[in-house]
Amino acid sequence: MPFLTFFSSHNRQINASTRLSILSLPNEILHLVLSCLSTPDLLVTCRVAPRFYDLALVIVSVRGCRLRLCFDQESRWRFAVDMTLASVTASQFAFVPLPSEQNCFLYASRVLRRPVLYKILLSEPNHNEDDEERDVLGSSVTVDVRHVGEHSKKLMHGAHFSYNISRRKSSSVKRQGEREIAALEFKCSPVWLCPRRTVLSRMFHAF
């Protein structure tokens, strides 16, 4: 038997036996082990088995995960909206604004560029003592603030950001382009919070 064929067969046997031994552990032990992982790493790891994934959802639901949506317009007006995890299902996470969040104002103008959502930071205050934040937004997206009413912005990989635009109450006749933006909800799949690898890193991982 060629060495590579033998090595590959032997490696598969080891992986199979390891998988069976891990699956035989009780939920209490698995819960303790999986709780040590950050949310993105936890969701990636637990995709290998439905049982792990169910445990991961239970763990994530009590971590108090938050998203901070960072906006910028013309590199002059910047603000951030903090949202907290409100509901967890196998296919969708839903975040809502914190009760203390205030409406922020931007400008709708033919001269000024539209605001940009340039960063979404994930934090886990109930899990990470250092409260380390990770940017989970793949690429920046523009936000429409010209039209008054509710909007839903679709992001990459199926995430949706819902927000409401209204005219600023204190706006004068000469400054009718002032708008207030109020975040309503942010929805995404659990996979959306997982680290995204480049094509090159995926190739190295395959080898």
Image (tube, grey):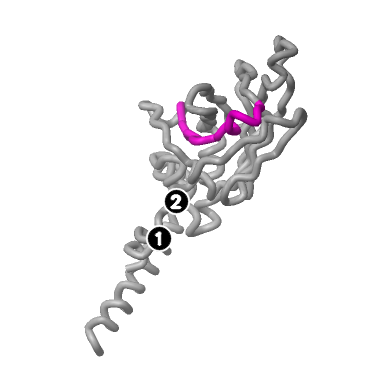
What residue sits right under mark 1 in the picture? 199
Which residue in the rendered view is the most extreme toward the right? 149
Viewer-nearest residue: 113 or 133? 113
Which residue in the rendered view is the most extreme toward the left? 3
* Residue 186 image-quadrant placement: top right
Residue at left offset 67%, top offset 24%:
182
Callout 1 amino acid: Val
Indicate the position of residue 110 as horizontal and vertical percent values: 65, 31
Q: Residues within 10 Å of mark 2 (few under 14, many from 20)?
A: some
Q: How far separated are the C-alphas under marks 2 and 1?
A: 10 Å
Specify whether residue 198 is in view: yes
What range is drawn magenta here? 108-125
Within the magenta stretch, is there residue 84?
no
Q: Is residue 85 above or below residue 188?
A: above
What residue sits right under mark 2 in the picture? 196
Indicate the position of residue 100 as horizontal and vertical percent values: 61, 16
Indicate the position of residue 166 as horizontal and vertical percent values: 74, 23
Pair 2/1: label in front: 1
Callout 2 amino acid: Arg
Task: For mark 2, give the secondary structure.
Answer: loop
Which residue in the rendered view is the most extreme toward the bottom? 1
Indicate the position of residue 141 as horizontal and vertical percent values: 56, 41
Q: Residues within 10 Å of mark 1 (few under 14, many from 20)?
A: few
